[in-house]
Image (cartoon, coloured by chain):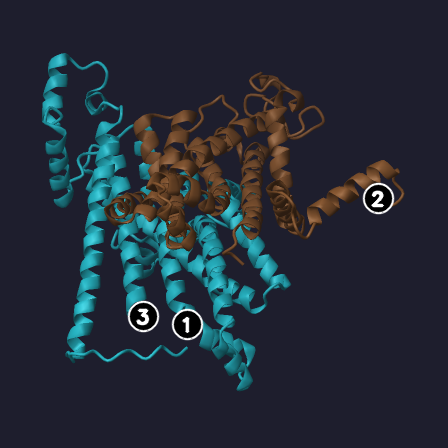
Chain colours: A brown, B cyan
Amino acid sequence: MSADMPSDTASQPASLRAWLHAPVPTSPFQARAQQLWLKLLRLTGNPPALLGLAILLVIAMMAVFAPLIATHDIYAQDLATRLQPPSAAHWLGTDELGRDVFSRIVYGARITLTIAGLTALIVAPIGLLVGTTSGYLGGWVDIVLMRVVDIFLAFPSLVLALAFVAALGPGIQNAIIAISLAAWPPIARLARAETLSIRSSDYIAAVRLQGASSLRIILSHVVPMCLPSVVVRTTLNMASIILTAAGLGFLGLGAQPPSPEWGAMLSSGREFVLTSWWIAAIPGCAILLTSLAFNLFGDGLRDILDPHHG
Amino acid sequence: MVDAPIALPRRPAAPGRRVFSSWALAGGRTVLSVAVTLFGLAALTFFIGRLLPLDPVTAILGDNATQAAYDAMYRQLGLDQPLWVQFLRYLRDIASLDLGTALTTGKPVVEDIARVFPATLELATVAIIIGTGLGIPFGVLAAMYRDSAVDHIVRVVGLLGYSAPTFWLGLMGLVLFYATLGWVGGPGRIDFMYEYDIEPMTGFLLLDTALQGQWEAFADVFSHVILPASILGFSALAYISRMTRSFMIEQLGQEYVVAARVKGLSWARTVWVHAFRNIAVQVVTVVALSYAFLLEGAVLTETVFAWPGFGRYLTNTLLAGDMNAVVGCTLLIGVIFVTLNLVCDLLYRIFDPRTR
């Protein structure tokens, strides 16, 4: 397709391509761009990961442009049209209060992505800091921190989140706190394992000989090396975070009605499921798709970013 | 694999003694680390139960109690004592298996848990039988025929098992197999008509009905347990097949596999007899771990299927703000997890000579 394009636009990509494929990069910026380009190329060679990314982009678009996409007011009740099957007026039917299920699913994407995103933002830095500190300093710090991690890991994450929500009270904010409290330890474990292999390498010894403090070494020389695997792990964790959040919503401990959170929608549609299957089926599909997308994309990211794997 | 020759010790010691002492050392360290973890579990549950903003006195007496009644209950619960005294009391209570009284039932939490736990154990056991019985063959087949259609199917099934919310699968299963097709029993453990014919013996209804020869009731119990167990088993299947696959792929790259093939053994025999033996220990530990994770899945599945087990007890007490029961349940799950992990560790140490 590039052959018969006008010359200026054709030469532009060609030279960019040459720049990206140059055997010897002339600047650090070019070297980084080349690496990024190679990773992108590898991502395009991985259809499942691309599929995951595409689904995630669609869901993100839904969340961002929810007011434009939604066809109805998500809180407007209309008992005359309750429990309608999918139709032209209501693409995914209506729920037990006559609210449009499609619009609620669209707005629900905002809640789900907020929970997943905020949890990841809380969990990844904490796990990374605890893990790298523990691994780099070793000794008593390591023993104490890893015991704490072990204690948190002794609970399945949903049960721990449930216990914290029970104490903190239901609601989205508390759900995020509870899930975060349950989700940081595996990341700390991972970061520690990575740090243990990095810490004895020559370049760390060199930095130490130059007089860098432990804090400096951890923050600017160990953390960046652990980052790829932590990013991969966090992406994969998002899948289970979404399931936990939906589970909390389903049990009535996460987002509260009338909020269009998918788990809560499933829960309120439960009584009518035997007669109106779509009320429960559709939010469930949304949860499944989002979680699946994070799993697919995370697996793909691991192939690209994690040099130890495969 | 040939190990590097071991340097002879300068002062010859009795070999049995050396083995014993290294075992004792490892054992001592394990016991110590488990003890520390259990102590931590107690501390964490204490923290959840006492320090977070839910007033236990109001939870017991309600909002309308008089100040005098409030103060009396406050003292009775020991809340006027310093925190460390409260914590020591809590430890003493746990050690004597006293988890307090559940507000929702008015009975000791330990008694409640003992009553509901068999139902969950039965569900989880049937689930793990399904998950293991299918998961291991799936994983091995996927590794044997890597990158074939079988492998892809196993991976997709695994991905769905990881990504699907169990409570949703449960609801859809009820709609399809109970309401539409009528293949399985509905929510609950057993039909009302059989419920009072069975003498409680073990608490496991499948066993009880079989032991008493009530085959009609047995069939009814089975039709109730099969759907929730299959759905729980599905998530176990996903984990077990994925791990089995990767263990097996690692083994199939070893030289002894090539040697066995060169000697003329069939592919199936090489895999199932020679390679499988080498992954058996790892697979057993994965199964033990997924058994523990079934307890987590049970919380949601039991809610969907109105299964009168541990998970539903936990949810009910949670919604009622019954912190004694919640803390007790959380503690129990933690202890089960730690125990299963310890068992896995021991299994590794006993059966895998490389860890010695």
How far apart are the two marked residues, 2 and 1, measured between alpha carbons? Answer: 55 Å
Report the chain holding disc 1.
B
The residue to which callout 2 is attached is A2
**Quadrant position of the N terminus of chain A in the picture:** top right
Badge 2 amino acid:
Ser
Disc 2 crowd, CA 10 A, few/some/many (<14, 14-19, 20+): few
Task: Give the image location of residue B199, x and y in percent.
Answer: 26, 52
Residue toward you, B214 or A136: A136
Q: Find residue A12 and report its image quarter.
A: top right
In the rendered image, the vertical position of residue A161 relative to residue B80, given as above or below: below
Badge 2 and badge 1 both on one subunit: no
Residue B278, numbered label: 1
Instruction: Tell me which label, 1 or 3, sits earlier in the chain.
Output: 1
In the rendered image, the vertical position of residue B7 relative to residue A202, given as above or below: below
Residue drawn at (52%, 44%) of the image: B164
Task: Give the image location of residue A216, x and y in percent.
Answer: 38, 39
Badge 1 amino acid:
Asn
Q: Find residue A96 and report its image quarter.
A: top right
The residue to which callout 3 is attached is B351
Residue drawn at (29%, 49%) of the image: A138
Circles 2 and 1: CB distance less than 8 Å?
no
Residue A129 visible here: yes
**Quadrant position of the C terminus of chain A in the picture:** bottom right
Report the chain holding disc 3.
B
Q: Find residue A287 and report its image quarter.
A: top right
Residue drawn at (49%, 54%) of the image: B238
